[in-house]
Structure formats: C-alpha cells, structure tokens
Amino acid sequence: MPVKSPSIRPSSSLIRLVCFDLGGVLVRICRSWSEACRAAGFELRGQWLNGDPPFNGWRALGIQLGSGAIDCRNWARQISVASDGLYSVEEILAIHDAFLIEEYEGVGAVIDRIHQSGIQTAALSNTNADHWARMDEFPAVMRLQHRLASHELRLHKPDPAIYREAQKRLRRRGDEILFFDDMPENVQAAREVGWNALVIDPHTRTDLQIEAGLVQHGLHRQRSTPAAHS
C-alpha cells in the first residue's frame, strides 16, 4: 500500500533555519592530499610520500585560498614552489579539483522535507572560487535557499566573525539556527556565538545524522500514514 513520505514539523522548536557545511556534510570529499592525489591519477612523490604536504605553510595557504585572499592558480603556484616543483601548477590544480567526489546519499530528500515544514535552509562553507563554481553538480546544494561561501565573505571558519556575518545576512538570531559541520572546531565556534550546532561524521550516512539532529532540536518527523485510495 502506498504511503506518504515522512515530513518534518516544527513542533515547539525555536529553529527557523537549518544551515549546512558542504564538504563532509552534503558532499563527499577527499579527506587528505594523498587521497585526492590518487583520485586525480597521480602518484605521491618525494617528500610527499608520507601523505600530506611536507611544509609548514600548507594550512596558512589554505586559509588564504578559502578567505579569498588568493586565487586557486596563485595557491597552486605557491604550493609548487614550496614543494620544490615536485608537482606542477597544472597537476596541483587537477588534484585540487579531485577533492570533490559526490553528493551523499539521501541528503536531498532531507532538505526537501525541511522546506516542506516551512523552515529555511542555507550553506556556510569554507570553500574557494573553483570548487564553488562546481556546486551545480550537486542537486542537494542547489536546493538550499541561501548559499554563503567563505571566499565571497572574505572570512573563514572557525573565525567567529564568519558566523556573525552569516547571521546578519540570513536575518536570523543565533538561537534560531541549527548548523551541521564535520569539523569539531567549527561547531564549537558556532556554539560560542549562540548557534545550535552539531558535528557530522563524514564517514557514515550523513543524512541519518542530520535527521537525528533535527529530532534532537525539536524538529520531529511525522509518522508515515497510508495514502487514501483513489
């Protein structure tokens, strides 16, 4: 017998907007340089054989890229120079492109149910112009009503300023926002500015974790009921 799809109802919750990080929450990504390198079809070379980039400025360059201070080609050029040319700029850009893999199973349906309940959705992602330009490959991301990117905001999680700026743009108080992110430091920073926030494990079904978080914050799923016969 056909049944209606389960929906989400607001109940007495204060939540009026659900905000998602993208990589590790809605979109599966490579979790390391070595994984992305293999995905792009390149071998690990020289000092990179042990895994991630072997120089201290790697993280700082990533923050510059994610906050829009440098573009992807400049980022790749600096990495190539810092690693003594073991990878060319073009190879680094190809590896960078390979970090995005696929949309997680079931997340689009969860977003649809959130919308059906009258609750808004948004993205707040540490990203860059090249990855951002590919978001139309992921239907769940394109379903979101608001999409905020770190490189456009010129801010970077977990800087508290990015959450305050997002809150201003979304026109919501912190206690009206429920945020999902796969990085504990980003979740903690969101909580410190007054958001409701939960950590997502990117290695298991993220849609089920999101569903559980919605229930935890008072956004209950209604029971499925038999459809009326025509």
Image (cartoon, grey):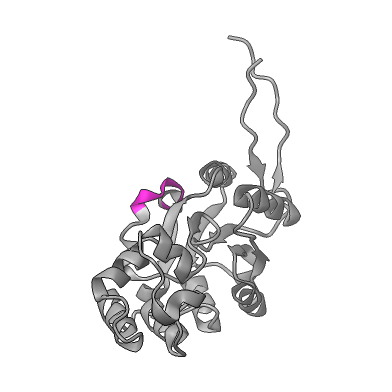
Q: How many marks?
A: 0
In front here: 77 or 165? 77
In front here: 31 or 181? 31
Could you tell me if residue 43 is visible in this image?
Answer: yes
Point out the stretch of residues depicted in magenta. 136-141
**Image quadrant where residue 227 sits:** top right
Image point (59%, 74%), residue name? 186
Image vertical order of residue 69 relative to residue 177, above or below: below
Could you tell me if residue 125 is visible in this image?
Answer: no
Measuring from the top left, give residue 179's x and y in whole percent: 60, 64
Instruction: Give the residue furthest to the top.
Output: 230
In front here: 177 or 91? 91
Left or right: residue 140 versus residue 89 is right
Measuring from the top left, give residue 162's x and y in whole percent: 49, 78
Left or right: residue 137 versus residue 55 is left
Quarter of the figure that contains the C terminus:
top right
Please check the rendered image and state whether residue 93 is part of the magenta-colored stretch, yes or no. no
Image vertical order of residue 80 relative to residue 197, above or below: below
In front here: 136 or 120? 136
Image point (64%, 72%), residue name? 184
Measuring from the top left, give residue 167's x and y in whole percent: 52, 72
Left or right: residue 133 versus residue 139 is left
Measuring from the top left, give residue 148's x and y in whole percent: 42, 66
Left or right: residue 127 versus residue 176 is left
Instruction: Give the residue furthest to the front.
Output: 46
Image point (25%, 75%), residue name? 89
Quarter of the figure that contains the N terminus:
top right
Image point (40%, 51%), residue name? 142
Magenta part mainly helix, strand or loop?
A: helix
